[in-house]
Amino acid sequence: MAEALALELKGITKTFGSVVANKDVDLKVYKGEILSVLGENGSGKTTLMNMVSGIYYPDSGEILVDGENVIIRSPKDAFSYKIGMIHQHFKLVDVFTATQNIVLGIKDGKFNIKAVEKKVMEITEKYGFNIDLNKKIYEMSVSEKQTVEIIKVLYRGADILILDEPTAVLTPQETQKLFNILRKMKKDGKSIIIITHKLHEVLEISDRVTILRKGMNVGTVETKDATEQSLTEMMMGEKIELNINREDPINPVERLVVDNLTVVKKDGTVALNNVSFNAYGGEILGIAGISGCGQKELLESIAGLQITTKESSIIYKPDDLENQQLVGKSPKEIRKLGIALSFVPEDRLGMGLVGDMDIVDNMMLRSYKSGRGTFLNRKEPRSLANQIIESLEVVTPSANTPVRRLSGGNVQKVLVGREISSAPKVLMVAYPVRGLDINSSYTIYNLLSEQKKNGAAVIFVGEDIDVLIELCDRIMVMNSGMITGVVDGRTATKEEIGLLMTKSVEREDSNE
Amino acid sequence: MNKTKNHEPLFHIVKRDSLPVYKSWGIRIIAILAALIVAGVITMLLTGENPINVYLTMFKGAFGTSRRIWSLLQSLAMLLCVALAVTPAFMMRFWNIGAEGQVLIGGLATAACMITLGDKIPNALLIIVMIVASISAAAIWALIPAFFKAKFNTNETLFTLMMNYVAIQLVSYFEKLWENPKGSSNIGIINQATHAGWLPTIGNFDYLLNIIVVLALTVFMYIYLKYSKHGYELTVVGESENTARYIGLNVKKVIMRTMILSGAVCGIAGLLLVGGTNHTITTTTAGGRGFTAIMVSWLAKFNPIYMILTAFLITFLESGAGEISTVFGLNESFSDIITGIIIFFIIGCEFFINYKLHFRSSHKEVK
């Protein structure tokens, strides 16, 4: 390439304890290009970029900006070299307006909100952002918040923009909008680095792709020469088959009948509004929607963890008992009926697992009460732990390692493995592959398919629409606590689901 | 923004993996040695005394005579007892800083039994009544903040702290009520003539009973926390209330139950102090143990067995440092300075156990 180098990394290494996050990474970014940094979770993409943006400091290696060796000790240093990063989790003050957030932390003489507004307006017009600058952050949708973050970085004069998984929270339509803006910035001569693990997006937006595997740079390719298959092979270091085994449901039996389910949160907002649907044994029901649209409340209501209104009804139809009304039952009773919920929250540990406990102790979270006596019986949990470690290939020094020490993907295998081990009649999983590498994700998908084959009613809340379309028999789309449509997983298209995700929006629930 | 060229920072901090046990204890021992050296230098600078002499005095103060050893063991046992009491609450992340008050209430209940029932009922029965009264009084005292925390999510730190003052005022009211002799505003030694309600001594050793009871409690607490279902539940609640809710745990019940236990053990401490050692009660009977115990518990990472060590360390420092002040005629605060330095080092060394520092490598400087 003839263009000038904007940023160059040479031999960057970063370790956390004995974990090597980045090893001897070289990377080049040219002016006016979009570079994708592709890699599985845990391959060191974010760590690498955090070093460029001043969050971490490398153990060794050099960073060059415009050909000059620089030392970046803090995000402020990074900005002085015109580097800005948009993090996956936004760093905004909720009660401030967009403009206030944009100028926050800049110390340059007088604070003149009029002048600031003018400058911000120029930026928005230049790149075609569509945003109300006087809106407060807490009133904004996720995509608006992201826009504020991007403007914030541009306002500080960044020429190198780093976006960490920018599309994870966007609908397909919003993603397209973002990509258009990124293309405009590229034309303007800015360098853009996108961290991602979504292959089709890499192919769509970037000029070049750098692939990281286990903290090392395993190669950079021109996007036009790459295919999904070739990129996957580079990411994984081996040829793999990525197939989800979707068989037709055999004799689906009605298991859950949800009627008029309404949940009002403590602050008076409606989390679920008159939701009605059925779930069948032997089928995977997918739930699509932007996160925070009531998916969590829906699953929690079924598990007995939410207070629902009087009109709500959730009927569970087991084979061996008469129909059971779940509303009003305690979580423990519902669980005993064979309804399992495995919710993987954003921090992965918040619910379902106890970080400081070891794998064995986490295995018995649900079962420790069984058996008489005051003392714990760790024999069965231990064998279950060993079994899960073996069958799901959990990487851990031993079954007695605190789960906090495990990497994200392994934490999840432990969680999902435990939930599935109880052989539930209704298995609800939310974001079970959040943060998992491709191989483990497919292990989990196939585990779910297996549960379905065994006759369980599987309810799957997912983020990745492509996966929903591949895995689920039916897909229910939610928006703002309402169901906006149910489509057939075998015939639905991404666009169709994307439209349903944003249908009839007055104001999106901005809580993530 | 600054246009000047940045220098590489002198060092940066990196989190460590877990260290092998011998290494982490090595760091702790180095920290204690370093603390002794620093404290020695400071002593020399401020007082002109030879630090070796100072430490010898300290050692003598703690172990000089068999009486001193017994008294050290007694203080150690009482401090350990209160530390055991606060531990389950702290593991549950319930910041019970009201142990002071709970001990006092346990002691007050003991004293009340001794004064009002002494010589009216057989001694054996009296002692049983004292045990029941002290344990239940302190347990109820601890349950009050737990109840409000569970029901209304009140702040337990403030609540338990305030309950301390209420307990102190209660004791001073009863001091006036039961004063003996009249006009002294002191309770004096209760049942001095009859020894009614005095806990029995084993052999000739005044403190042996207390020590044995506390040792038994230590073992009990260790097993309770590590192997019982209750212990498991309170750990889950402490780690993540969300998880506890998800597995259908009754969080409120666990909070209240754990605080009853915490209070009950404080009650035992009050019983031992009033019925076993002092045979009287004053507003300072708890003697700040309720607060020192928190440190003992934290330093031992809530492990009851390690608490024997940390409680020993703190008791040793207190008695030894007290001796320095008397022998060298120093202000009492001086012993606090030394204790402070040593504890600072011990707590500070945890940083080096969890993190390591990367210094700017020298070969880069050359370039």
Image: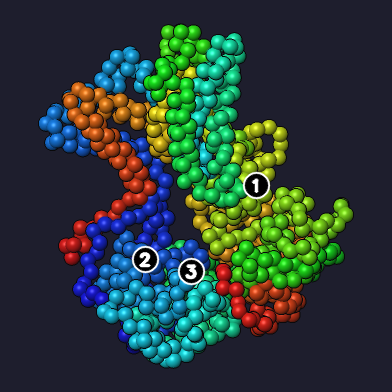
Q: State the quadrant of the N terminus of chain B.
A: bottom left
Query: Mark 2 vs mark 3: same chain?
Result: yes
Q: Quadrant of residue B24?
A: top left
Q: Tell which subunit mark 3 falls on.
A: A
Where disc 2 sits, the SS reads loop
Q: Quadrant of residue A171?
A: bottom right
The mark total stands at: 3
Q: Tell which subunit mark 1 falls on.
A: B
Q: Is residue B208 left or right of residue A484?
A: left
Q: Nearer the viewer, residue A293 or B168?
A: B168
- Measured in 3D between alpha carbons, the distance from the residue under mark 3 to the one under mark 1, in whole angstroms, is 31 Å
**Residue A196: x, y in percent?**
50, 73
Where disc 3 sits, the SS reads loop
Q: Quadrant of residue A91?
A: bottom left
- Measured in 3D between alpha carbons, the distance from the residue under mark 1 to the one under mark 2, in whole angstroms, is 39 Å
Residue A55, numbered circle? 2
The residue where tag 3 is placed is A89
2 vs 3, front mark: 3
Amino acid type, mark 3: His
User: Which residue is pictured at 67% across the width and 53% down the height?
Assistant: A419
User: Which residue is pictured at 71% across the width and 34% down the height?
Assistant: A372
User: Which residue is pictured at 42% across the width and 61% down the height?
Assistant: A21
* Residue B140 sits above or below residue B122 on the image: below
Q: Are marks 2 and 3 in contact (CB under 8 Å)?
A: no
